[in-house]
Image: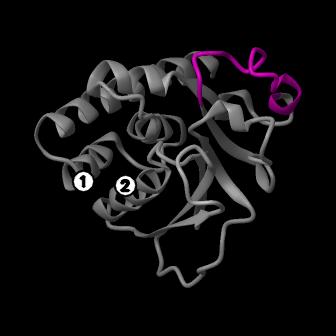
């Protein structure tokens, strides 16, 4: 079973990201579940959502304590919330930022993890450019697909089409495609 935690703030589409990730996994014939955990339920408050992907039925319903991957939609949470707690040593980290690992103050943390599994992606900027809103969730899903190989870009596109229609779907597909290729370029150059 592969377990993912998505950290962000209310209004950034954290819950939607986990749900779309599970839809993408379903599109590939796998079992998946997604669910949120809220503190104070208001815009801007820290939010975490969980997604599990497996080739077998998933019976676990509790929050993810030991994550295989962490997606961080808001980089201001990096030093405010324990986003890396329980992350497996071979885990994947994807951060919404145009800054590199050192600039984010994560150099020491990154030395404990394989560099190819740690990536930053300017997802907010991609959201603004392609859909006109600073929502980083869809670009991060495609970036996660590129970084981890757990799901395919085609499955992310199907999840987008299941969730959105018209220009919103087209913009999100465009943002996802660019995000996927950006991460592939970074990941490939790190190998």
Residue that badge 2 annotates:
20
Q: Position of residue 45 (x, y in %)?
A: 62, 49
The residue located at (32%, 67%) in the rendering is 29
Decide which of 52, 172 is in the foreground and name it: 172
Q: Closest to the observer: 129 or 45?
A: 45
Magenta segment range? 96-110
Per the model, the C-alpha gap separating discs 2 and 1 is: 8 Å
Outermost residue, bottom direction?
59
Tell me the crowding category of disc 2: few under 14, some 14 to 19, or many 20 or more residues within 10 angstroms, Cα based: many
Q: Is residue 63 left or right of residue 149?
A: right
Q: How is the image coloured?
A: one colour
Q: Position of residue 12 (x, y in %)?
A: 47, 42
Can residue 166 be seen? yes
Mark 1 lies on a secondary structure that is helix
Determine whether 178 is above or below 19 in the image: above
| Residue 97 among magenta residues | yes
Q: Is residue 118 magenta?
A: no
The residue indicated by pointer 1 is 163
């Amino acid at each position: 079973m592969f377990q993912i935690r998505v950290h962000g703030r209310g209004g950034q589409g954290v819950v939607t990201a986990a749900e779309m990730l599970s839809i993408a996994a379903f599109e590939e014939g796998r079992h998946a579940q997604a669910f949120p955990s809220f503190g104070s339920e208001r815009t801007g408050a820290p939010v975490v959502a969980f997604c599990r992907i497996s080739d077998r039925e998933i019976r676990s319903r509790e929050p993810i304590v030991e994550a295989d991957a962490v997606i961080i939609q808001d980089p201001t949470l990096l030093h405010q919330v324990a986003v890396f707690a329980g992350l497996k040593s071979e885990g994947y980290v994807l951060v919404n930022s145009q800054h590199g690992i050192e600039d984010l103050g994560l150099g020491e943390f990154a030395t404990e993890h394989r560099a190819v599994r740690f990536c930053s992606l300017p997802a907010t900027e991609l959201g603004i450019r392609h859909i006109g809103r600073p929502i980083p969730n869809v670009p991060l899903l495609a970036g996660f697909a590129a970084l981890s190989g757990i799901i395919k870009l085609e499955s992310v596109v199907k999840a987008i089409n299941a969730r959105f229609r018209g220009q919103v779907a087209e913009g999100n597909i465009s943002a996802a495609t660019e995000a996927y290729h950006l991460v592939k370029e970074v990941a490939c150059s790190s190998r």
